[in-house]
Image (cartoon, grey):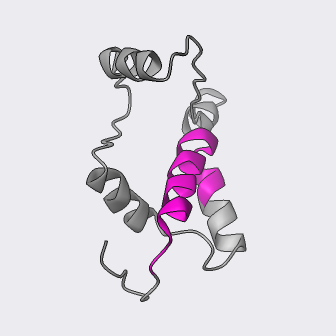
Amino acid sequence: MGRSSNNYQFDPNVNKFASVLNILAGHNAYEFIRINLSDALPSTTTLKNYNQNISLPLRECEFRFDLLKNYLDSIDSNYVFASTEADGNLSASEK
């Protein structure tokens, strides 16, 4: 991976952690943590590039059951944790 515009190059484990944090906590929570832990986590642009480089395209409202099934079979697991970021939906539905 090339250097970002601010010349930081994050360890692959940091990128992996940041990707999981962004998925599980949601975009707003990730940005809050990233801003408050200055220079500890990659920007959302860097994170998006990382996800594309590892062939992890994330699209809203798309669930890939076949890939999930293959992954669960490969790690011999029957359990899944699912999360959603509902911040935008909550504010719209409360009006």
Q: Residue at x 38, y 33 (%)?
A: 60
Q: Residue at x 51, y 16 (%)?
A: 76
Residue nearest the viewer, comparing 57 with 55 = 55
Q: Would you say residue 23 sits in the magenta stretch?
A: yes
Quarter in which the C terminus is drawn: top right
Q: Which residue is drawn at 48% across and 69% down?
A: 43
Residue nearest the viewer, comparing 11 with 62 = 11
19 vs 14: above or below: above
Quarter in which the N terminus is drawn: bottom left
Residue nearest the viewer, comparing 29 with 90 = 29
The percent position of residue 9, horizontal first and vertical second, equals 44, 79
Q: Residue at x 47, y 63 (%)?
A: 12
Pick out the residue farthest to the bottom: 7
Res 77 quadrant in image: top right
Residue nearest the viewer, comparing 60 with 89 = 60
Q: Would you say residue 6 sits in the magenta stretch?
A: no
The percent position of residue 17, horizontal first and vertical second, equals 57, 54
| Numbered label tally | 0
48 vs 95: above or below: below
Q: What main secondary structure does the magenta stretch of the protein show?
A: helix
The percent position of residue 18, horizontal first and vertical second, equals 55, 57
Pick out the residue farthest to the top: 78
**Image side of residue 57 versus residue 85, left or right:** left
**Image side of residue 53 versus residue 27, left or right:** left
Q: What stretch is highlighted in magenta?
A: 9-30
The percent position of residue 90, horizontal first and vertical second, equals 63, 32
